[in-house]
Image (tube, helix red, strand yellow):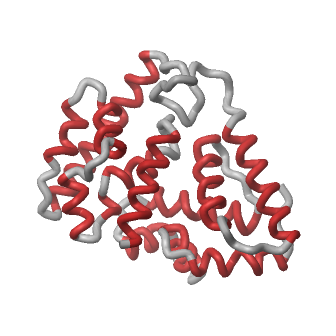
Amino acid sequence: MQPPSDSVRSELEPLLRANQKRLGQVYRLMDRGWPDPRIAAELGVDSSNFVSNNRNTVRAILEGRLPNGPAMATQIASAVRGLTRNVPLSPETTAYVDTLLQALTAMSTSAPSRAVPVNRVAGDATTPAPPRQLRTLVDNAIKQRVTEMERRLVTIGIDPDDYHAVVTAEFSLDVVERLVSGGAMSRTTRELVDRDRLDLSMEQAVLEWSADLPLASSLVDDARGRLDYWRSQ
């Protein structure tokens, strides 16, 4: 995809600079020339992969550089829509954003044929349930990641007993869905909100996992919506 013109960049850069979410925080530190590990440390995020995902989003917006995989394309498209929603843009910039979104959407729906789209793992009325092997691989990956998450939470004095249910459950993804989409805020997440450490929450983890695990888009949307709401309070 062709990179944007200087005039288009001049419209999009202030939107990134003014963004109060993680994307804007990462961009402002990128603008200082900071490497990913330093940005991660500054934002209190243990994994520089989270910073790398946001860096990929910035590059897509300002350089027209498309990501490598459909899951990342879906994530970037969501960020672009959020950044430009209800913002009056010039015709040239509007055309560029539309072209970028079309390219990202095409990527997100052009994964190689498999039993379930890459951004789906939990079946719904229109999506068949995934093969047992894929589900088992996803559940095992989640168990390993939540085990590491528990270790980090314990080091800051939090007993994540409700998160631990993910590790002990036969179907770990089902427990993640209950924690993130089940209505009431989980006890561990509530404590993380009180401590301003949402970077260690299950909701933040879901956003990060969506880059390489085939999670349902509805689950990712729920996680993002909750985080955006809590950070706005």
Locate the C terminus and report the quarter of the image it occupies: bottom left
User: Which residue is at 22% across, 59% downward?
Assistant: 190
Q: Position of residue 11 (x, y in %)?
A: 75, 78
Q: Could you tell me how many numbered marks the image carries? A: 0
- The answer to whether 78 appears left or right of 139 in the picture is right
Q: Where is residue 28 in the image (x, y as percent from the top left)?
A: 55, 79
Q: In this view, does 41 lie above or below 64?
A: below
Tell me the quarter of the picture where residue 58 sits.
bottom right
Locate the N terminus and report the quarter of the image it occupies: bottom right
- The answer to whether 95 appears left or right of 201 in the picture is right
User: Which residue is at 15% across, 56% downward?
Assistant: 154
Q: In this view, does 189 lie above or below 92?
A: above
- The answer to whether 113 appears left or right of 180 in the picture is right
Tell me the quarter of the picture where residue 64 sits.
bottom right
Tell me the quarter of the picture where residue 162 sits.
top left
Q: In this view, does 172 lie above or below 149?
A: above
User: Which residue is at 72% across, 48% downward?
Assistant: 104
**Towards the viewer: 102 or 35:** 102
Q: In this view, does 130 lie above or below 152?
A: above
User: Which residue is at 49% across, 20% downward?
Assistant: 130
Q: Where is residue 21 in the image (x, y as percent from the top left)?
A: 49, 70
Q: Position of residue 140 (x, y in %)?
A: 33, 30
